[in-house]
Image (spheres, coloured by chain):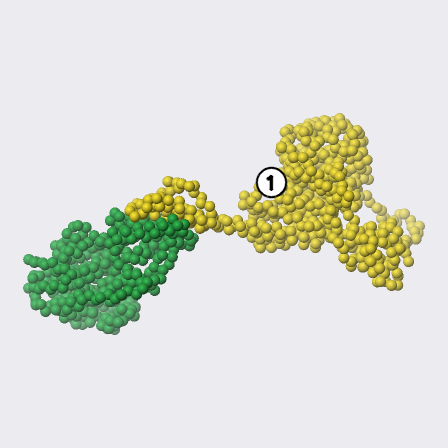
Chain colours: A yellow, B green
């Protein structure tokens, strides 16, 4: 009875023989920023934008959700936003930090923020805004040997968001490894554990040796704070300016500033990332300024702010025995019924009782009752309990944990962006895997105006509304797309299995589930979960069927137009001949002959199934020369 | 001193002595055989009633054809006014739908038709071409001019694309209007010549074919402009080769033997065939051919006789149905002692052609003809008309032809 804890009796072994010690997470990851996507390549530009826009969008959403009333069921009501601003402009690109005095005081930080905010001061306090600026600084003087030969430039990166902002305490933690505002409870958020910003800071410091500048103002507080610091391998901060009260020109939000080294800037990476981000985040105004000084503005397009995803306890289905054992080990519940019904969603006390009873039947020798506490269970009992737990049927997990973008919004946004003859979106109802809910959304855009593309140019991947530009063919989305028989939907197919041509596909996987299924810490690809693959495939097929209907219609229409064109061409010649011949026929009524060309035009148009293209009076110029 | 009397399509016989200028045997028996043949031709047969659904194809004159085109198109315009796409119903002109009543010498068109509509993608181009050709034919009729098939093609190269296409369309116009090609004023160039006892009017010019020197009158393709005025010939002689023609024209052979001479200088063109037919029909003359003694010569005879092997829509209008093969026959080579050195060896092509001809039904049913061809093949010998000159240049005109005519030695 009870868990037998077998702890080795500590014998006094000499220290000098022990070699294993626990390392520091920070120490490990500081040197391996490439694991999180920071290496000397074009994608680094993307990664900086990605990390901070992820955080910014999460922060903005948190701010709006905090303000909205919650119904009794704790489901938030979507916020209705005012009419989007008529035009969002960013008139003057601020000077780069190269020429300005380095920020080392609260005032200089404040000034810099004011300068950046000035062109959008009319909306900064009323609209959700994300502003990112990347500029080129002076060339680095010294380079380490491993990169000495390469042509590296130094860039500054600044981001401002009008999110919920950070309190003083949060600000102190911000940027350290594993410091996250997203709790261990997995929700549908973009960021999760707290690797993003910290990795970015590591890369910035590693490559330039310059400190990080952060300023933030929480929506509930009257003042903002600024700090300048380095992060250390001990996962602490080394300050140049400890958190100090600072006047900040926006009412709530965060400003960060850092510098990094990378290859010379090229378009098509960071700007592409920001552009795609705007596709599924139409509820935010996004502005990006690149080192060339080009300003990319993506204004808000929708009236409704996105709904807050709920949180739910894990779902019993597809819980592994390891997860189960872990929960039991860490459980503080005093009874099994409590443990079961409170650790999992869709598990009532009655159901818990049923499970316990069934489990008891499995091992008569070691009776299980609901009065036992989880910690008291033996291995055999745990196994029996798990077996009956897993064999039960449960209702699907609550779908409030998943907030899809929605077919209508996706369609409307893509239609505005592409102005295409065919835009269709499909949002599959939420389902779950590994105990967490998710939903798949797929959209297709088709227009002969679009350029012929294949591979990455055709498939756009999104996870929790965040675009993923790397590790494309590694991702479950890609694999699901290439498993579809696109030829069946009248598409040309490339050797990679994706359709080619004037078509664009979009897939968005949303839900807390995604956090469990990224293939690497860089969070660029999803692993191949069976249920995920199935959902994706079904989504693609559904959108494929709509696409096929459209293409067939287009082909039929084109064929009809071609046929009509041919028939009308001939009928005009015939009309001319008939008029020429019958002109000399005394028995031919003149009126009937005069009306002939137009009549024939109408008859043939009708036969060809189209509207008569000529106006009421036929042009005189249509003369066929007759000798 | 040619006192001529008008010869109409009546059965009045006058003596021939008036016309003979030469001194040689001028007995009336000379042409007894020929006259006998002639009187058999003059008895016309009553045409039987046409079966239902069958259309008679006839030559039509300008005015009638003009009116018919207008009438056809008037109903077409009316159809369009009712809201229907115009369509043309074409009788099929393949051998499966045409009947040549050889006894009455009539071309009959059966009931099978095909409909070409402007509303169908498949046939719209055809309809356009047909109406375009109708437009051209209408213009030709209105202005009373003629055009060749090639000229019609050039009239709208974009629409026709290829002369073969315009030719096919032109072929279809005949059945559509129930008439032959000639009536539509679409012609082909001609190369034949006519000499002899014939007076005609060509576009208003009066032409006496006895007074055209030795060259003769060139047959014009505009045969509707030609009117046969009068003739006192007893027969028509169609000569394959110009060389033989010259032989006869040099001595004005027609003065001794009243006839009309016609040659197309080899394979006959359409105008020559039409004119030969006309002479034979209008003047009710017996017609003979003088060809080489070889399968090709016999083939030329068959072309004048009934046209191409396969019965086509036009052939009845180009045939001279009662044409007789006068010479040079296979059996004449021995009969008239053509020396062996003047006879040529038959080639394999000749033999092939000879065999093909014997297989033709219209040849096979003529046993004498078959026998003659078989004789040539057996001997493997052939001879040209000119071989007769081995007996002297005058042999052809003075001996050979008269003897043959007198004795009725023809097939």
Q: Which quarter of the picture shows residue B25?
A: bottom left
Relative placement, left or right, of A503 versus B346 is right
List x then y, in percent, for residue A326: 83, 52
Report the quarter where the C terminus of chain A lies.
Answer: top left
Chain designation of label 1: A
Q: Is residue A456 above or below residue A101?
A: below
The residue that disc 1 covers is A416
Above/below status of A176 relative to B216? above
Is B7 displayed left or right of B372 in the figure? left
Q: Is residue A33 left or right of residue B106?
A: right
Residue A101 at what x, y percent from top left? 72, 26
Residue closest to the eye, B151 or B108? B108
Residue drawn at point x = 65 percent, y = 30 percent:
A93
Q: Is residue B344 above or below residue A409?
A: below
- How many discs appear? 1
**Residue at coordinates 37% horizontally, 46% vertically from top-left?**
A596
User: What residue appears at the point 42 percent right and 52 percent down from the top-left corner?
Assistant: B119
Q: Is residue A48 visible?
A: no
Q: Give the quarter of the figure containing the N terminus of chain A.
A: bottom right
Q: How far across and how far down the image is residue B229, in percent?
A: 15, 56
SS of the residue under disc 1: helix
Image spot of residue A158 (x, y percent): 70, 34
Q: Quadrant of residue B255?
A: bottom left
Q: Quarter-wise, where is residue B337 in the image?
A: bottom left
- Residue B89 visible in the shown view: yes
Judging depth in this view, the residue of B100 and A140 nearest the camera is B100
Q: Is residue A357 left or right of residue A94?
A: right
Kindly identify the residue that appears in the image at 29 percent across and 69 percent down: B360
């Amino acid at each position: 009875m009870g868990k037998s804890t077998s702890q080795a009796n500590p014998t006094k072994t000499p220290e000098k023989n022990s070699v294993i010690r626990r390392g520091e997470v920070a120490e490990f990851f500081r040197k391996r920023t490439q694991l999180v996507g920071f290496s000397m390549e074009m994608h680094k530009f993307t990664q900086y934008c990605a990390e901070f826009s992820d955080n910014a969008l999460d922060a903005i959403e948190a701010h709006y959700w905090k303000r909205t009333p919650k119904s009794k069921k704790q489901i938030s009501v979507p916020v209705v936003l005012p009419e989007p601003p008529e035009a969002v402009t960013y008139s003057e690109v601020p000077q780069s930090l190269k020429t300005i005095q380095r920020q080392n005081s609260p005032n200089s930080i404040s000034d810099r923020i004011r300068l950046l905010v000035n062109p959008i001061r009319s909306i900064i306090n009323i609209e959700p805004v994300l502003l990112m600026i990347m500029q080129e600084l002076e060339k680095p003087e010294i380079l380490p040997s491993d990169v000495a030969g390469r042509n590296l430039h130094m860039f500054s990166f600044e981001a401002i968001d009008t999110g919920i902002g950070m309190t003083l305490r949060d600000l102190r933690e911000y940027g350290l490894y594993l410091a996250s505002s997203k709790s261990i409870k997995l929700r549908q958020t973009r960021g999760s554990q707290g690797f993003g910003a910290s990795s970015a800071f590591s890369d910035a410091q590693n490559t330039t040796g310059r400190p990080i500048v952060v300023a933030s103002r929480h929506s509930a507080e009257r003042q903002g704070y600024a700090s300048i610091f380095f992060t250390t391998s001990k996962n602490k901060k080394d300050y140049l300016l400890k958190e100090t009260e600072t006047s900040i020109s926006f009412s709530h939000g965060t400003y960060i500033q850092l510098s990094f080294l990378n290859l010379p800037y090229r378009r098509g990476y960071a700007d592409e990332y920001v552009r795609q981000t705007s596709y599924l985040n139409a509820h935010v105004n996004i502005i990006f300024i690149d080192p060339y000084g080009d300003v990319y503005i993506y204004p808000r397009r929708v009236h409704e702010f996105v709904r807050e995803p709920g949180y739910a306890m894990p779902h019993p289905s597809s819980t592994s025995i390891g997860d189960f054992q872990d929960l039991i080990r860490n459980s503080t519940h005093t009874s099994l019924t409590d443990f079961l019904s409170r650790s999992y969603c869709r598990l009532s006390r009655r159901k818990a009782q049923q499970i316990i009873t069934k489990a008891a039947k499995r091992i008569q020798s070691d009776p299980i009752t609901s009065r036992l506490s989880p910690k008291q269970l033996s291995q055999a009992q745990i196994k029996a309990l798990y077996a009956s737990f897993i064999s039960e049927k449960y209702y699907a997990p609550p779908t409030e944990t998943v907030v899809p973008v929605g077919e209508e919004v996706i369609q409307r946004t893509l239609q505005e962006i592409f102005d295409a003859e065919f835009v269709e979106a499909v949002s599959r109802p939420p389902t779950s895997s590994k105990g967490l809910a998710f939903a798949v959304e797929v959209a297709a855009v088709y227009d002969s105006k679009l350029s012929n593309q294949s591979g990455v140019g055709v498939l756009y991947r999104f996870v929790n509304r965040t675009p993923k530009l790397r590790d494309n063919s590694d991702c479950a989305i890609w694999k699901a797309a290439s498993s579809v028989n696109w030829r069946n939907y009248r598409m040309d197919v490339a050797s990679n299995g994706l359709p080619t041509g004037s078509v664009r596909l979009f897939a968005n996987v949303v839900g807390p589930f995604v956090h469990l299924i990224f293939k690497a810490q860089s969070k660029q690809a999803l692993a191949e979960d069976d249920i995920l693959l199935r959902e994706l495939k079904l989504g693609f097929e559904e959108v494929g069927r709509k696409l096929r209907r459209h293409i067939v219609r287009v082909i039929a229409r084109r064929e009809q137009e071609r046929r009509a064109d041919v028939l009308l061409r001939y009928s005009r010649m015939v009309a001319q001949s008939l008029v020429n011949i019958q002109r000399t026929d005394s028995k031919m009524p003149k009126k009937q002959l005069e009306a002939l060309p137009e009549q024939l035009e109408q008859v043939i148009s009708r036969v060809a199934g189209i509207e008569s293209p000529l106006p009421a009076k036929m042009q005189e110029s249509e003369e066929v020369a007759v000798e | 001193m040619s006192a001529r009397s008008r010869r109409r399509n009546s059965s009045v016989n006058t003596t021939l002595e008036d016309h003979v200028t030469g001194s040689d045997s001028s007995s009336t028996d000379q042409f007894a055989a020929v006259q006998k043949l002639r009187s058999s031709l003059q008895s016309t047969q009553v045409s039987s009633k046409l079966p239902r659904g069958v259309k008679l194809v006839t030559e039509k004159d300008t005015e009638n054809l003009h009116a018919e085109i207008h009438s056809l198109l008037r109903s077409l315009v009316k159809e369009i006014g009712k809201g229907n796409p115009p369509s043309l119903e074409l009788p099929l002109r393949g051998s499966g739908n045409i009947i040549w009543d050889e006894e009455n010498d009539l071309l009959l068109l059966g009931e099978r038709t095909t409909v070409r509509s402007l509303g169908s993608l498949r046939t719209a181009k055809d309809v356009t071409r047909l109406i375009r050709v109708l437009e051209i034919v209408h213009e030709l009729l209105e202005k009373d001019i003629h055009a060749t098939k090639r000229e019609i093609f050039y009239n709208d190269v974009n629409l026709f694309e290829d002369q073969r296409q315009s030719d096919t369309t032109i072929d279809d116009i005949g059945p559509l209007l129930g008439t032959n090609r000639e009536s539509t004023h679409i012609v082909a160039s001609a190369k034949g010549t006519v000499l002899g006892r014939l007076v005609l009017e060509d576009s208003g010019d009066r032409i006496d074919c006895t007074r055209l020197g030795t060259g003769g009158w060139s047959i014009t393709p505009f045969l509707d402009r030609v009117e046969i005025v009068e003739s006192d010939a007893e027969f028509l002689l169609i000569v394959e080769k110009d060389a033989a023609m010259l032989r006869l024209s040099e001595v004005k052979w027609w003065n001794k033997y009243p006839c009309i001479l016609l040659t197309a200088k080899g394979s006959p063109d359409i105008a020559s065939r039409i004119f030969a037919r006309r002479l034979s029909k209008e003047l009710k003359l017996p017609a003979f051919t003088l060809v080489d003694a070889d399968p090709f010569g016999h083939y030329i005879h068959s072309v004048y006789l009934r046209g191409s092997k396969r019965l086509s829509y036009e052939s009845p209008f180009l045939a001279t149905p009662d044409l007789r093969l006068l010479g040079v026959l296979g059996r004449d080579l021995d009969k008239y002692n053509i020396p062996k050195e003047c006879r040529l060896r038959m080639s394999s092509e000749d033999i092939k052609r000879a065999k093909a001809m014997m297989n033709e039904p219209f040849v096979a049913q003529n046993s004498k003809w078959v026998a003659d061809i078989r004789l040539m093949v057996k001997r493997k010998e052939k001879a040209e008309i000119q071989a007769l000159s081995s007996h002297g240049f005058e042999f052809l005109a003075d001996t050979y032809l008269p003897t043959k005519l007198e004795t009725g030695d023809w097939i």
